[in-house]
């Protein structure tokens, strides 16, 4: 029942205007970055060309060369997190459809299937454009290229230290392409988790205006940016979800944040499922 | 067809169109260094009098203090990489340095072994010494072993000593030491590599070449084979 309900909800949510809008915006951003790369680097000698994966929109390494795409991304993503699917429960509560669904499926199955569907849809919306960019880059740039956008060579100490500091560095060492795919999925999954947490919040706290639900993840990410201005505490969210990020970071922060969000989603959904859905 | 499938189909069409555009542009990336004898079409810098004086001072003072000094034979040609070059050698004798023994194969990397090819330059960035040729023995000065963070390299990788304004790789045999330039008319700062391909040093005059060869001999005497 849970899997069937989840599948149905995923199919419904994928073609909603919110998912299509968010996907379209991210796709446009990605394509802009892709065209910029193609036009900028065409005609470059292969041996002096940058690695195709380091040119991706999600690549932190690209900020060594041009940071406009990353700047747009870090401003757009906090606003877009809830657009694809996270507001769907609030919408169904407003229309009364949630009462019908809860009575048919049982509130626990309904809520868990809804949370799972929101997670999956948001993950897909946030990762698919950038996965497509990986394919486009493989098709459009020479795969023999190995350069770093900071123009560091393999014997530069900064290059060695920075590369070793990548999250999932062993995977990068095995294959930069596989690393890019996995990290892109991780980026999508992180946004999916934030969307699922917002949905859980909407299950626990009834809001009159759905637009207010955009605030929690937006404020959380902005708080991470604000706290990171202090030299003692670097928790800036973009440092933990972008590719090829090799600067100083505390990965324990990421694991704690993910664990906390996951715990909130699971426990919050359990709690909300005990509520009376007729009100 | 249901209307809700139209936006995804439009997205897919956009991606495919841009993919075709990108695939077409892929043909624009030249691979000069993959061609045989690619260096023939590039230029190299020649050593002038001021540079030679500076190098001659450093040769005896700084190079013998290098952490790793080896007699080696190249087993590959120079392989250009991103703003550097690498070449494989087999160690014939170890004069200085721990952890290396005769018979071992190593990679040596140097930033001065790079090919700089763009709309402005078509140059090998050699520091006045020709690339090591297979079949010759060389005295080589290295600074350190490198940690390779991209992929897995089974052989150890070392960095060529720098800071002496010359690539410290010296042939035990004298290669072509004839500079084809009139006595009063030194070569240009940059010359086509094909004109100096067999020479040991890239010198703007015969006097500079002779000074470099003499300094090399003095250095080789300290590390006899």
Image: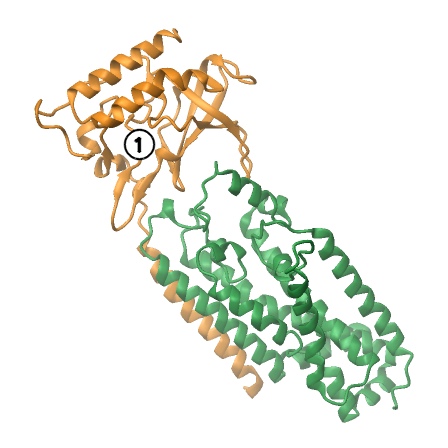
Query: From where the camera sits, is residue A10 visible?
Result: yes
Q: Which chain is green?
A: A
Give the quarter of the figure containing the N terminus of chain B.
Answer: bottom right
Left or right: residue B87 versus residue A75 is left
Tell me, yes or no, if residue B71 can be seen here: no
> In the displayed structure, would residue A232 be above or below residue B75?
below
Q: Position of residue A180 (x, y in %)?
A: 56, 55
Q: What residue is shown with label 1?
A: B126
Q: Quadrant of residue B22?
A: bottom left
Q: Residue at x 59, y 58 (%)?
A: A242
Choose top left, top right, bottom left or bottom right for residue A108. Answer: bottom right
Q: Position of residue A238 (x, y in %)?
A: 61, 61
Residue lying at 30% horizontally and 24% vertically, measured from the top left: B54
The chain letter corresponding to orange is B
Classify residue A76 as left or right of residue B173.
right
- In the rendered picture of this protein, how many numbered marks are placed on residues? 1
- Closer to the camera in the image, A227 or B133: A227
Q: What chain does badge 1 belong to?
A: B
| Rendered location of residue A15, percent (x, y) | 62, 81
Q: Nearer the viewer, residue A176 or B219?
A: B219
How are the residues colored?
A: by chain
Q: Secondary structure at mark 1?
A: loop
**Viewport quadrant of the C terminus of chain B:** top left
Q: Residues within 10 Å of mark 1 (few under 14, many from 20)?
A: many
The quarter of the picture where residue A261 lies is bottom right
Q: Residue B148: x and y, percent? A: 53, 36
Residue A88 located left or right of residue B31: right
The residue under the point 82% across, 68% down is A264
Instruction: Work out whether B166 lies above or below A21.
Output: above
Asked whether A63 or A25 is in front, the reply is A63
């Amino acid at each position: 029942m849970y899997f069937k309900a989840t599948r149905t909800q995923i199919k419904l949510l994928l073609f909603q205007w919110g998912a299509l809008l968010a996907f379209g915006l991210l796709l446009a951003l990605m394509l802009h970055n892709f065209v910029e790369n193609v036009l900028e680097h065409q005609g470059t000698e292969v041996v002096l060309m940058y690695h195709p994966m380091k040119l991706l929109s999600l690549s932190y390494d690209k900020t060594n060369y041009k940071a406009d795409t990353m700047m747009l991304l870090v401003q757009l993503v906090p606003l877009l997190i809830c657009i694809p699917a996270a507001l769907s429960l609030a919408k169904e509560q407003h229309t009364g459809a949630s009462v019908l669904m809860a009575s048919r499926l049982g509130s626990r199955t309904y809520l868990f299937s809804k949370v799972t569907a929101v997670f999956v849809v948001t993950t897909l919306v946030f990762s698919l454009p950038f996965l497509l960019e990986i394919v486009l880059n493989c098709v459009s740039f020479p795969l023999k290229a190995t350069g770093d956008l900071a123009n560091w060579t393999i014997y530069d100490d900064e290059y060695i230290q920075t590369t070793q500091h990548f999250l999932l560095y062993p995977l990068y060492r095995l294959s930069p392409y596989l690393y890019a795919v996995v990290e892109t999925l991780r980026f999508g999954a992180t946004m999916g988790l934030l969307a699922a947490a917002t949905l859980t919040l909407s299950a626990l706290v009834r809001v009159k205006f759905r637009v207010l639900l955009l605030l929690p993840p937006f404020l959380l990410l902005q708080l991470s940016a604000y706290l990171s201005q202090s030299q003692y505490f670097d928790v800036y969210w973009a440092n933990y979800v972008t590719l090829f990020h090799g600067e100083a970071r505390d990965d324990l922060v990421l694991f704690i944040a993910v664990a906390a969000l996951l715990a909130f989603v699971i426990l919050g959904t359990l709690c909300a499922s005990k509520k009376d859905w007729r009100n | 067809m249901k209307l809700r499938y139209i936006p995804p189909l439009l997205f897919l069409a956009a991606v495919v169109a841009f993919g075709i555009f990108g695939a077409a542009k892929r043909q624009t990336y030249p691979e000069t260094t993959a061609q045989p004898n690619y260096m023939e079409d590039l230029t190299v810098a020649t050593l002038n009098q001021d540079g030679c004086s500076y190098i001659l001072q450093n040769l005896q003072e700084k190079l013998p203090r290098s952490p790793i000094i080896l007699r080696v034979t190249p087993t590959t040609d120079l392989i250009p990489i991103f703003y550097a070059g690498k070449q494989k050698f087999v160690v014939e004798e170890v004069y200085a340095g721990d952890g290396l023994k005769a018979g071992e194969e190593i990679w040596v990397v140097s930033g001065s072994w790079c090919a700089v090819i763009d709309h402005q330059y078509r140059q090998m960035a050699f520091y006045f010494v020709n690339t090591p040729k297979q079949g010759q023995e060389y005295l080589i000065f290295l600074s350190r072993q490198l940690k390779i963070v991209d992929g897995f390299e089974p052989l150890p990788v070392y960095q060529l000593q720098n800071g002496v304004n010359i690539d410290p790789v010296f042939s035990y045999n004298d290669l072509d030491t004839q500079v084809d330039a009139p006595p009063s008319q030194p070569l240009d700062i940059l010359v086509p590599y094909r004109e100096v391909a067999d020479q040991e040093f890239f010198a703007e005059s015969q006097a500079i070449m002779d000074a470099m060869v003499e300094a090399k001999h003095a250095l080789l005497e300290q590390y006899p084979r």
